Image (cartoon, grey):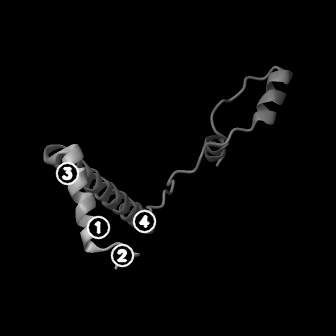
Amino acid sequence: MLGGISIWQLLIVLGIIILVFGTKKLRNVGTDLGGAVKGFKKAINDEEKNKEDDQQDTEQPHAKVSHEEPGNTYDVQAEEKRAAEGRPTDSRPTEERNEERK
């Protein structure tokens, strides 16, 4: 049957195990083993659920960020030249100065 082990041999081994350990200990071992298997299955299911959630998050397109206002531009070299010549420097952005000149 099971690799040369008959039903009678299995029953004899089971009887010896019951005599040695007792039914109470075997029940506790069975309960502990069942709880461990249940916890293992729960952990695997939770991990699979987390992977699915992560995949859904990565599949959704992200919103694009756009800046409506242009950035301020400073002409550093021109300010350094003015400072070297002794003229007052204008710390306003170049765009503001250009608009003022128009």
Say which amino acid is labelled 4: Gln
The residue indicated by pointer 1 is: 9
- Residue 43 placed where, x, y %? 32, 54
- N-term mark: 3 or 4: 3
**Is 59 positioned to the left or the right of 98 in the image?**
left
- N-term mark: 3 or 1: 1
Say which amino acid is labelled 3: Ile
Tell me the SS state at disc 1.
helix
Residue at x 38% of width, y 66% of height: 56
Name the mark nearer the viewer: 4 or 1.
1
**Is 61 positioned to the left or the right of 74 in the image?**
left
- N-term mark: 1 or 2: 2
Q: Which mark is residue 18?
A: 3
Residue at x 23% of width, y 45% of height: 20
Q: Is residue 12 above or below residue 93?
A: below
The residue indicated by pointer 2 is: 2
- Residue 75 placed where, x, y %? 74, 38
Say which amino acid is labelled 1: Gln
Q: Nearer the viewer, residue 10 or 83?
A: 10
